[in-house]
Image (spheres, helix red, strand yellow):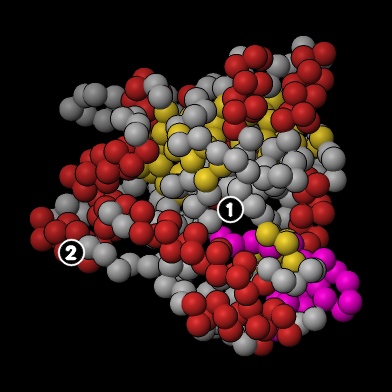
Amino acid sequence: MSDFNIWLSPPDLSGNERKYVSDVFDSNWIAPIGPHIDKFESKLGLFLKSKNVVALSSGTAAIHLSLQILQVKKGDLVICQSLTFVGSANPILYCNAEPIFIDSESETWNMCPILLEKAINDSLKINKKPKAIILVHLYGMPAKINEIKEISKKYKIPLIEDAAEALGSNYDGIPLGTIGDFGILSFNGNKIITTSGGGALISSSFEHIKKAKFLSSQAKENTIYYQHKEIGYNYRISNVLAAIGLGQIEQIDKKIKIRRKNFSLYKKYLNDIEEISFLEEPLNFYSNRWITTILVSSQNGFSKEKIIRNLRENKIESRPIWKPMHLQPLYNKYKFYSNNTSEKLFDLGLCLPSGTTLTEKQICKISKIIISSK
């Protein structure tokens, strides 16, 4: 069964997206560059309180450019969170570098600061200082960014914040993606705002963003003819997709409010089920609640797999949380610092429908199906 009546996180194009795309067609700015890119980047920058933003073809491209700007090369070590989507890790291999994977802590499900520091010290013992740390804010929940930022500064290792799932989340009022040396966003079709496909790179350094714009446009030199001195990439977002993004970013506050309400409604209907637990916000942590996730304790015939099956039979999409990188065939040969948290989360974790068009009636229905799976 591939068609669902309720999807996990479908796109919601209910703003001025059609108007802005029509503007693009009317002005014939169909080519990759165009004024809507500048407007989209400007709106993103205002929302993030950051002047230095470049819109790209994907979040993965943004991570790759970050590593390129940091001159990560063959044989270098890059530390990465294990519990994440593969797009967080693949750019390490694009650079022919070697990933070191770090397990999660149970409070936010993100990178464990204790294991991070252990991995750094072990690397220093063999005279191989890691070139970068890729931290992920999973499902919109801020990682222990303050602790990890301090470790990054202590060892002078650049920090890349993978905020692909966390636009609108913040730590102590500071937008995620703006705390590290680099921040990345994704505007894939299932994200809190979408450009169909797309992403962005953020940095406090104007020079870093200037370099990213250069590399993302095939590294073309500033000449009337096409001249290239280094390898570049076709990573810039198109003006058409930026027009969609412009309509989306105008509604970001509304979308966050709805996603957070979805989480609260699931808690309302499922909070009394002892086999189910939710990921709560620690003090000063603010999540956009991009996806509502639960942990399902397998007991009394209750299980994550049974819930997924029962929801699917009712044409409702749900999914297990991300399978950790250290369990993936592509990455299981690389060093992994473990405390067993991410494997437990993968065994028990379930993502529930969380789109901004979801109604309370639908959430009530989903919750009843979950309860009936006992």
Magenta-highlighted residues: 291-310
On the image, the x and y values in percent for residue 166 come to 50, 47
Tag 2 residue:
19
Q: Which amino acid, mark 1?
A: Tyr
Label 2 secondary element: helix
Question: Quadrant of the rendered structure where residue 160 is?
Answer: top right
Q: Is residue 323 above or below residue 126?
A: below
Label 1 secondary element: helix
User: In the rendered view, does 309 fall on the left or right side of 170?
Assistant: right
Q: Residue at x 45, y 36 (%)?
A: 173
Query: Going from the N terminus, do you reach mark 1 or mark 2 first?
Result: 2
On the image, the x and y values in percent for residue 134 come to 61, 34
Q: Is residue 352 above or below residue 125?
A: below
Question: Quadrant of the rendered structure where residue 8 is?
Answer: bottom right
Tag 1 residue:
139
On the image, the x and y values in percent for residue 323 come to 73, 55
241 is within the stretch colored magenta: no
